[in-house]
Amino acid sequence: MPAKKDVLPLIRALQKLYPKHVIPLHHANAWELLCAVILSAQCTDARVNTITPHLFKKYPTVQDLAKAKLADVEKIIHSAGFYHSKALSLIEMSKRICTVYGGEVPQTMEDLLTLRGVARKTANVMLGDYFKKPAGIVVDTHVKRLAYRLGLTKNTDPVKIEKDLTQVIPYKYWGWIAIALILHGRSVCPARKPQCEECTLAKFCARCGVK
């Protein structure tokens, strides 16, 4: 595994491609982003972005969603898949935010993990992408794949991958690096047909012949 100083050329190359920390899920506040991330499980961001405007129009505040009927929420988010469990998570998450956290999304890993529908990946999105105080690095399927191909980890378990990444990536890049890898994984380096000839990261990639 490379040392931190060896990772900087890769980080600079990624920064040229993805200089801004842009969250692809549309939101106006922390609660809306949390709802969107919960909906995004096994669902595309594009699909989520078509659902959330209707959801937030009917339930504009966390208090409104906390009082919602399950069947009504299910109807709105049906196309996101797993709509029953996701609707239940949205309602129960909102209830707990209202009753325990005064209507504000909590800003610690420990507290976020007490919310229904929130696991470590979702908590990392909130802490790193929204609150700008990351406690770790988001590891989704794209990050998992690219981290392995780019020699940042030899593990396949997301928890171990996150640990490896936090050891080699400087802290100031923790929030941004996942977004950059996700965008690159979607546009250039998908699982089945990576565009190696067009990839400016090829020189860092074990799949492309780096030794």
Image: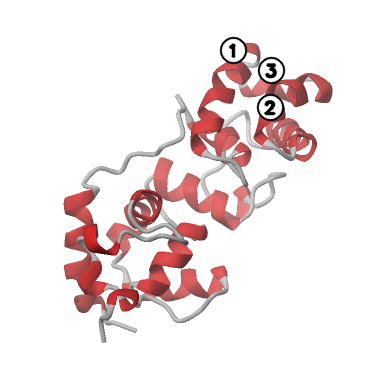
Instruction: Tell me the element at label 1.
Output: helix
Residue drawn 83% across the image and 22% down it: 71
Q: Amino acid at mark 1?
A: Lys
Q: Residue furthest bottom?
A: 211
Q: Is residue 208 left or right of residue 30?
A: left
Q: Is residue 20 above or below residue 153?
A: above
Mark number, residue 64: 3
Residue drawn 30% across the image and 43% down it: 21
Residue beneath label 1, please?
57
Q: Nearer the viewer, mark 1 or mark 3?
A: 1
Residue 153 shows in the view? yes
The C terminus - image quarter: bottom left
Mark number, residue 137: none
**Residue 35: which quarter of the image?**
top right
- Residue 50 placement (x, y as % from top left): 54, 24
Residue drawn 38% across the image and 73% down it: 149
| Disc 1/disc 3 C-alpha distance (Å) | 10 Å
Residue beneath label 2, please?
77
Residue 138 shows in the view? no
Q: 205 or 77, which is in the foreground?
A: 205
Q: Amino acid at mark 3?
A: Asp
Instruction: Indicate which disc, 1 or 3, sits on the residue closer to the N terminus.
Output: 1
| Disc 2/disc 3 C-alpha distance (Å) | 16 Å
